[in-house]
């Protein structure tokens, strides 16, 4: 019986601990991401939510570059 997509994902996670790796990466990067957003607030005289939305929009382009797909998901969750 062929394995399902969900089972395959679970297997990869067990082997490579992907969920924890992504969580650790995001935790390591979050301070820098928020620091950049805070800097934009001061430079452009905009509110925090506007700066965050602008950064999320920038993440939609070249999603694989600089792990933007992870950054986008984390910023959207905040």
Image (cartoon, helix red, strand yellow):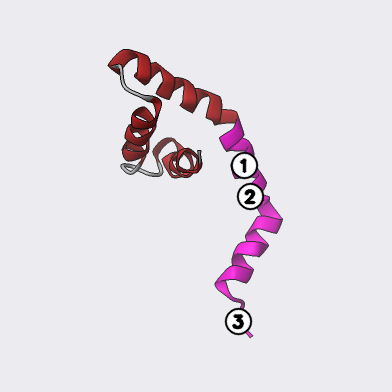
Query: Any magenta on residue 2?
Result: yes
Can you tell which of label 3 and label 2 is closer to the viewer? 2
- Across the whole image, how many numbered discs are drawn on residues? 3
Image point 33% across, 44% down: which residue?
60
Query: Spatial distance from mark 3 to mark 1, Cα to Cα?
Result: 30 Å
Rendered-image quadrant of the N terminus:
bottom right
- Of 46 and 24, which appears nearest the observer? 46
Q: Which SS does the magenta portion mostly show?
A: helix
Q: Position of residue 47 (x, y in %)?
A: 35, 24
Residue 64 pos. (x, y %): 41, 44
Residue 78: percent from the left, percent from the top? 50, 38
Q: CA distance from mark 1 to mark 2?
A: 6 Å
Q: Earlier in the sequence, mark 3 or mark 1?
A: 3
Q: Nearer the viewer, mark 3 or mark 1?
A: 1
- The answer to the question of whether label 3 and label 1 lie on touching residues, with beta carbons closer than 8 A, is no
Query: Sequence order check: which comes first, mark 3 or mark 2?
Result: 3
Q: Residue at x 47, y 20 (%)?
A: 35
Which element is circle 3 on? loop
For image coordinates 32% across by 36% down, the residue present is 58
Residue 22: % across, % down:
59, 43
Q: Are marks 1 and 2 in contact (CB under 8 Å)?
A: yes
Task: Please state the extent of the stretch shown in magenta in the rendering.
Answer: 1-27
Q: Residue at x 60, y 33 (%)?
A: 27
Mark 3 = which residue?
Answer: 2
Find disc 1 in the rendering and name its residue: 23
Farthest residue in the left direction?
44
Residue identifier under label 2: 19
In the image, is 78 to the left or to the right of 59?
right
Q: Is residue 57 magenta?
A: no
Q: Is residue 30 above or below residue 18?
A: above
Return the mark for residue 34. Answer: none
Give the CA separation, mark 3 to mark 2: 24 Å
């Amino acid at each position: 019986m062929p394995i399902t997509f969900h089972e395959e994902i679970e297997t990869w996670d067990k082997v490579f601990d992907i969920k924890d790796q992504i969580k650790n990466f995001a935790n390591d990067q979050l301070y820098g991401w928020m620091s950049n957003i805070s800097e934009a607030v001061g430079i452009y005289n905009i509110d925090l939510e506007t700066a965050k939305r602008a950064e999320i929009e920038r993440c939609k382009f070249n999603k694989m570059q600089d792990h933007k797909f992870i950054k986008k998901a984390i910023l959207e969750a905040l």
